Structures are given as structure tokens and as C-alpha cells.
Image (spheres, grey):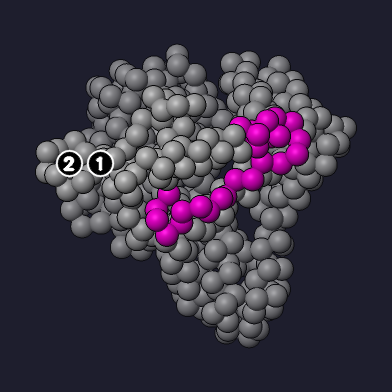
């Protein structure tokens, strides 16, 4: 199985890696917590890390952990993987959150780890969740203790370590990339939970439809914790001996949002309200829903990411500055922190709500992605293939390619799509903002390309 388990032991709490999981599991705990993997074989997905002969599998089997940064989306298994590494090494596992705790707590953990090593010889794995929330100086504080071997540091982040983690720490703690779960892996996670009579739902006599299981696996969006939460809510709706059909799965997915929401707020309803207020050009509603989420304890960087998404999805090339404004708001919050940085998010929300809208890039991307999946075997046309070797040139790679900037009007008479897709259009500019100018430019290029083609045909014998 492959996801970040809910924290059972509390941030900053030391736990012996050799202790029994069965004793620690509370039958009233959420299904995602009860079903967290106990061995690497139960860990679904991440074959690039845990497959036979892969680096983390070898590390776990050797029982000799080293420091690392685990980078992956929510629910991809960062916390669980860190626990499995500690379990295999018989080290003490100490969980620490960069969101709620600071350097004083780090010093306490280091001191305890040093005493433990001197007294018993046991090592300590310090798991720092959301390590990207530490600034440069705070991250530097780990360095001497990692180098000395007082602790093995496993940092977890959802942000790109290249931008968020200082280089000296990256050189001592290499990055391991976790991917979202595939729908197939998620279906296996859900099926295991339905069938397990001890930790899962196997003792409740619940039946299920394949379509409902597939729906939950898709709707979980790569996050097993989310999928298990929705499954648990669906099971509660139908009750013992019931049957989870597609309607129950849909209802369970919506119910799960409220149950597992931060601070009791309807998290997904609120972010939907913010998104729709911006899409509907209502700055007052956008500010209100943004304020509700920040006041309810939502991660401001989550909101920044959603604003960036809205700039691309709902505004696009009608106003390309929208993307720059939202990225600047994210950087401003990074620089200022709360509460000063919240004003930058508010400014971005108002900007998005009051600018022109276009979803044409979003629609074009969806269409292009669908065609790409339908035509996975289409070869790249020879004239635009890369030809780094003599053999490839002899085979016709790159032959006949024309360098557009050197052609008349900067347009060459050539196609860039596979032959089967020649002439297809995915992006159709809209009528607002800058997109009418883009349409004119595309039409002008098409005209010049056709003129170049006509000249070529007239010159051919």
C-alpha cells in the first residue's frame, strides 16, 4: 500500500521502531490509519523505489538507513515509507512537523538522540514533515547533526526540493521522488481494505459493485488516504451487510470531504466556492471565501497553488499576466509569511476575479491529452526528428526540415503533427482579452504557410 498515514503518535513523539503495530492500532481510528502498510510488501506502488533491487528496497533490507528527502504529493506514502525504514533498522522514530514546531524542539530531539546513542547504541530517525516550511537558517541547523550521525534525517515535502531545500542539505540527503498512485494501485488498496477482517471492513459483510470501486479509485486522484476515507464513508452509509453501489460511492466521496476537513470546515466546498466566485467575476465573494479558508486554518500555500491553477484554467491567454500575478503572490507569501503575506493572496484573488476570462487553453489541453492517449503509437514525422548521429541522418531523420525564422515571413511550408493528425486544431482562441490578437496571428501564419505551399507546388516540375 502507498500513502501517508494519519499521524497516530503525535508530532514530535518518539516511537520504538520495533514496537507492535497491532498494539498501536485503535479500532476506532480512521480506516486510512488502520490500513497503513506494515511491511514493504504491503506498500503498493512506488516500484521505482521499492521494486526488487531498487535503492530504498535495498536500504530497508540492509537495515542501514541514510538521510533523504521524500518528495511527492499528498497521500503518496512519505510518512509510511519513513516508518518502514525505521522499523527495518530498529531505530527510534521521531516525527516532527515544520508547521507546528521549531528549532527549540529540534534541539531537544537531537539531545535525546545523542543520549540514546551513547546509552544504548540505538539510532534515531528524525522525520521532518513539510520540511520546506523551514527557512534556510532553520534547515542549516540539521547539517552538523546529520554529518555526525546523531540522527538520520528523513524530510518530507510536497514542494520541489530544488527550490525549497538548501543545497548543503540536499547534498547530504538525496531526493527520492514518489509518484501519485495509479488507479490500479488504488483499486488494490481499496480491495484490501474491504477484505481485511482485522484492520479493514472485512468483518462487516459489506458487498460492493466493481463500478463503485473503480469510481473511488479514479476519484481518489492518486491519494490512497483520500480513497480510503471515501470508502469508509460509503461503508458507513450502507451499513453492515449493505452493498456499496455507484450512488453510495458518490455520496461517500462527498461525505468524506466534510468528515476529514481541517478545523471542521467543508474544505472542498469552500475551495469550490472560491474557484466559482473567481470564475464568476465576483471579487467580494472571492475575498470572503479566501478569508474563510485562511481563518479556518487552511495552508496558505495550498491556496496559492489553487490560485495559480485558476489563472491557467479560467483566464489563460485572455490575460497572461494572471499567471504572473499568482506566482508573484505565492513568492510574496514565502517571503513575508503570515499574516502579512496573506494580503498578496487577497490581491491575486481580486485580480483573477476582475480580469477577463477564457478557458480555451484548458479545453485545448484536454483535447490534446485525449488525442495523445488515443494515438500513442503515432511516429514523429521524419523532418522534425532529432538527428545527432550519421546513421540517423542516413535514415532520413531531420531531412527536409526548414528553419522557420529564416523563411519568408518566418513561416515554413511544413507540418509539425503526425501525418494522421495533420490539420487538427486543439486551441481555438476566444473573443476576450488578448486572444483575438492571437487568433489574427494564427490566421496570418496559416495564410502565409498556404502561400509558401502554393509557391513550392508551382516551382516543382
Was residue 418 drawn as part of the magenta stretch in this picture?
yes
Q: Which residue is mark 1?
A: 399
Residue 440 higher or lower than 363, as above or below: above
- Closer to us: 424 or 201: 424
- Closer to us: 323 or 402: 402
Residue range corresponding to the magenta coloring = 416-442
Q: Which residue is mark 2?
A: 393
Residue 221 higher or lower than 91, as above or below: below
Q: Residues within 10 Å of mark 1 (few under 14, many from 20)?
A: some
Residue 244 higher or lower than 135, as above or below: below
Residue that appears at 57% across and 50% down: 426
The picture places residue 163, in percent across and down from the top left corner, at: 44, 24
Q: Residue furthest left?
A: 391
Q: Secondary structure at mark 1?
A: loop
Of the two numbered discs 1 and 2 in the rendering, the one whose residue sits closer to the viewer: 1
Label 1 or label 2, whichever comes before in sequence order: 2
Q: Residues within 10 Å of mark 2 (few under 14, many from 20)?
A: some
Report the Cα–Cα distance between label 1 and label 2.
Answer: 7 Å
Amino acid at each position: 500500500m502507498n500513502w501517508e498515514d494519519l499521524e497516530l503518535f503525535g508530532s514530535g513523539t518518539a516511537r520504538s521502531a520495533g514496537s507492535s503495530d497491532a498494539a498501536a492500532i485503535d479500532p476506532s481510528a480512521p480506516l486510512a490509519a488502520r490500513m497503513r502498510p506494515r511491511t514493504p510488501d504491503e506498500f503498493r506502488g512506488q516500484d521505482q523505489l521499492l521494486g526488487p533491487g531498487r535503492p530504498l528496497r535495498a536500504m530497508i533490507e540492509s537495515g542501514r538507513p541514510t538521510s533523504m528527502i521524500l518528495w511527492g504529493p499528498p497521500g503518496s506514502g512519505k510518512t509510511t515509507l519513513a516508518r518502514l525504514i525505521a522499523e527495518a533498522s530498529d531505530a527510534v522514530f521521531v516525527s516532527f512537523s515544520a508547521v507546528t514546531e521549531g528549532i527549540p524542539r529540534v534541539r531537544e530531539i537531537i539531545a535525546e538522540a545523542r543520549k540514546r546513542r551513547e546509552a544504548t547504541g540505538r539510532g534515531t530517525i528524525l522525520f521532518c514533515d513539510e520540511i520546506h516550511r523551514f527557512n534556510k537558517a532553520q534547515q542549516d541547523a540539521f547539517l552538523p547533526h546529520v554529518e555526525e550521525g546523531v540522527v538520520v534525517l528523513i524530510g518530507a515535502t510536497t514542494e520541489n526540493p530544488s527550490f525549497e531545500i538548501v543545497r548543503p542539505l540536499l547534498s547530504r540527503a538525496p531526493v527520492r521522488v514518489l509518484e501519485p498512485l495509479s488507479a490500479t494501485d488504488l483499486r488494490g488498496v481499496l480491495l484490501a481494505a474491504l477484505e481485511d477482517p482485522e484492520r479493514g471492513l472485512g468483518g462487516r459483510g459489506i458487498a460492493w459493485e466493481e463500478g463503485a470501486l473503480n469510481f473511488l479509485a479514479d476519484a481518489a486522484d492518486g491519494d490512497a488516504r483520500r480513497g480510503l476515507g471515501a470508502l469508509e464513508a460509503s461503508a458507513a452509509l450502507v451499513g453492515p451487510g449493505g452493498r456499496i453501489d455507484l450512488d453510495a460511492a458518490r455520496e461517500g466521496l462527498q461525505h468524506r470531504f466534510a468528515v476529514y476537513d481541517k478545523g471542521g470546515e467543508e474544505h472542498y466546498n469552500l475551495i469550490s466556492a472560491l474557484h466559482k466566485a473567481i470564475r464568476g467575476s465576483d471579487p467580494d465573494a472571492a475575498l470572503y471565501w479566501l478569508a474563510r479558508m485562511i481563518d479556518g486554518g487552511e495552508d496558505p500555500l495550498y491556496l496559492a497553488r489553487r490560485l495559480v491553477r485558476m489563472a491557467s484554467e479560467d483566464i489563460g491567454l485572455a490575460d497572461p499576466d494572471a499567471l504572473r500575478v499568482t506566482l508573484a503572490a505565492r513568492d510574496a507569501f514565502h517571503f513575508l509569511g503570515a499574516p502579512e503575506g496573506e494580503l498578496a493572496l487577497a490581491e491575486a484573488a481580486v485580480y483573477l476575479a476582475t480580469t477577463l476570462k477564457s478557458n480555451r487553453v484548458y479545453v485545448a489541453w484536454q483535447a490534446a491529452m485525449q488525442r495523445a492517449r488515443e494515438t500513442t503509437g503515432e511516429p514523429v514525422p521524419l523532418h522534425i526528428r532529432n538527428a545527432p548521429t550519421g546513421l540517423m541522418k542516413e535514415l532520413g531523420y531531420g531531412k527536409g526540415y526548414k528553419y522557420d525564422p529564416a523563411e519568408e515571413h518566418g513561416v515554413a511550408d511544413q507540418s509539425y503533427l503526425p501525418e494522421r493528425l495533420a490539420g487538427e486544431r486543439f486551441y481555438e482562441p476566444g473573443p476576450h482579452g488578448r486572444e483575438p490578437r492571437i487568433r489574427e496571428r494564427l490566421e496570418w501564419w496559416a495564410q502565409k504557410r498556404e502561400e509558401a505551399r502554393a509557391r513550392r507546388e508551382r516551382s516543382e516540375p
